[in-house]
């Protein structure tokens, strides 16, 4: 199960998607992926997270902690082989407040009933409200509100329990610029592989290991994880992000289309702990 981070320096590299800490929910990375299945045609989700910052944060970072606000909402749908989604995400983490709108469309090809290949694209609109008072550089030239569009592309192949996907986010590599690139939406490539193993004859207990690899202009990272699903009503999971040394534990429940997911993560390099909550409904 998956979430997002920002790296702050004089110029910030921004990833405009929350990477929600939920196994196999790579639809945040890959517009060819849909979570609508098992007889459902629509999915709605809302999420937020709470960050806990220790009192000695200033001693480690020599600065005051930024507010850490993150909320979002998303709709996904499927009509025949057409998959589509729309989402809103607000991130108030750093020296700017960011509002992101996403609209995606994909199509699933079925080959000999067993093989499925999905191709999708997504349009992003990022609206950045920059706060000069939180910057340590000269700001008299600063345009405080900027809009940056971008595009994501993805493809996914599925065969029974096997999932293979490749995607590129921020294909244009857009940036909010005032004489210098202040906020850069880094172009990134993602590759994911996972497999669903059934551990009992009734196919009620499923073990799903996954690997996520991503490469950017200034970063390389990988995530290893595993998820247990019980009778399609409950699941628990764990994953580890290598570069960040981030540990993520998850637990979730689903009943008659209603979904609740909770994820807790921590990383020694950030001196923070986060608690994420997602509510959803399939219909």
Image: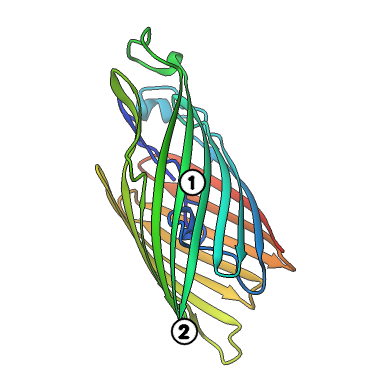
Q: Which residue is mark 1?
A: 18
Where is mark 2, residue-wise?
114
Q: Earlier in the sequence, mark 2 or mark 1?
A: 1
Left or right: 122 in relation to 82: left
- Name the residue furthest right: 256
Q: Residue at x 43, y 61 (%)?
A: 239
As helix, strand or loop, the secondary structure at mark 1 comes to loop
For image coordinates 47% across by 82% down, the residue present is 160
Residue 39: x and y, percent?
A: 66, 74
x, y percent for residue 19? 47, 50
In this picture, is 168 found above or below 9?
A: below
Where's the C terminus, which quadrant? bottom right
User: Which residue lies most toward the top here?
Assistant: 140
Disc 2 versus disc 1: nearer the observer: 2
Q: Which of the numbered marks, if any, corresponds to residue 65?
A: none
Secondary element type, mark 2: loop
Q: Residue at x 46, y 25 (%)?
A: 96
Residue 83 image-quadrant placement: bottom right
Left or right, 260 with reference to 82: right
């Amino acid at each position: 199960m998956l979430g997002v981070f920002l790296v702050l320096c004089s110029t910030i590299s921004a990833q405009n998607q929350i990477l929600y800490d939920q196994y196999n929910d790579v639809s945040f990375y890959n517009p060819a992926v849909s979570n609508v299945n098992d007889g459902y045609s629509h999915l709605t989700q809302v999420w937020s997270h709470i960050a806990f910052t220790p009192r000695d944060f200033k001693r480690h970072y020599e600065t005051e902690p930024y507010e850490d606000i993150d909320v979002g909402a998303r709709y996904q749908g499927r009509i025949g082989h057409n998959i589509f989604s729309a989402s809103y995400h607000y991130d108030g983490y750093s020296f700017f407040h960011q509002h992101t709108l996403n609209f995606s469309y994909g199509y699933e090809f079925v080959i000999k009933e067993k093989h499925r290949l999905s191709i999708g694209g997504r349009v992003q609109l990022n609206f950045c409200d920059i706060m000069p008072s939180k910057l340590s550089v000269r700001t008299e030239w600063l345009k405080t509100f900027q809009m940056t569009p971008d595009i994501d592309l993805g493809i996914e192949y599925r065969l029974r329990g096997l999932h293979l996907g490749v995607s590129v986010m921020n294909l244009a590599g857009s940036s909010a610029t005032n004489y210098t690139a202040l906020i850069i939406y880094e172009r990134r490539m993602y590759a994911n592989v996972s497999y669903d193993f059934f551990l009992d004859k009734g196919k009620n207990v499923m073990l799903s290991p996954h690997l996520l690899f991503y490469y950017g202009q200034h970063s390389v990272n990988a995530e290893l994880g595993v998820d247990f699903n019980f009778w399609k009503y409950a699941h628990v999971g764990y994953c580890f992000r290598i570069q960040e040394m981030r540990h993520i534990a998850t637990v979730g429940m689903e009943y008659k289309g209603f979904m609740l997911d909770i994820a807790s993560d921590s990383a020694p390099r950030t001196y923070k702990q986060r608690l994420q909550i997602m509510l959803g409904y399939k219909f």
